Amino acid sequence: VQLQASGGGLVQAGGSLRLSCIASGIVFDSHIMAWYRKAPGKQREAVAVITEGGTPHYGDFVQGRFTISRDNAKNTVYLQMNSLKPEDTAIYYCAADSFLHYVCSGRDPPSDVAHWGQGTQVTVSS
């Protein structure tokens, strides 16, 4: 299984980035896809998840700024991030699992996730 994330970079506060994650080695449309992030000194936290059927869920801190989507024909999940804040600075990880449904509520801890990508750095300057 390989999850190849890209799209991170350096952006000023208020700017936008679009992350992409291409999956291989899994039956993509049978997997829940998620984005997590980990900032220095903080625990890994769920940013957004999208179910097999395309229903999105977001962490409380997103507050309407991010949009997760998926293209099953391309085995790709996206995270469009707008109105970025310095506190969004972190390594963003793509994740996949067949059974996680409560990622953003915290009921499915990161330790339960089956597959992880390598991460892409997002840095937001003030």
Image (cartoon, grey):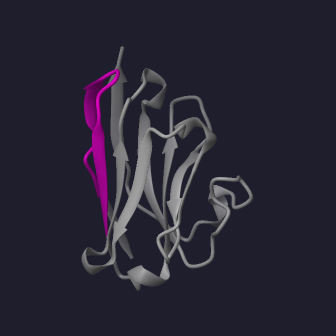
Residue 21 on the magenta span: yes
Main SS type for the magenta part?
A: strand
How many marks overall?
0
The residue at the far front in this view is 64
Q: Nearer the viewer, residue 25 or 98?
A: 98
Identity of the residue drawn at 39% across and 80% down: 28
**113 sits to left or right of 71:** right
Residue 47 image point, x, y percent? 53, 47
Q: Residue furthest right?
A: 107
Residue 56 against residue 97 in the figure, above or below: above
**Which quadrant of the figure has residue 100?**
bottom right
Determine the residue positioned at 59% across, 45% down: 59
Q: Quadrant of residue 77?
A: bottom left
Q: Quadrant of residue 60?
A: top right
- Who's the residue at 25% across and 47% down the image? 7
Residue 13 location in percent, x, y? 34, 21
> Does the stretch in magenta take in 61?
no
Percent of width and height locating residue 55: 52, 67
Q: Which residues are magenta?
A: 5-22
Say whether residue 107 is left or right of residue 53. Answer: right
Across and down, in percent, residue 120 comes to: 33, 46
Q: Residue at x 43, y 22 (%)?
A: 86
Q: Is residue 116 above or below residue 87?
A: below
Quarter of the C terminus within the rendering: top left
Nearer to me, 7 or 116 = 7
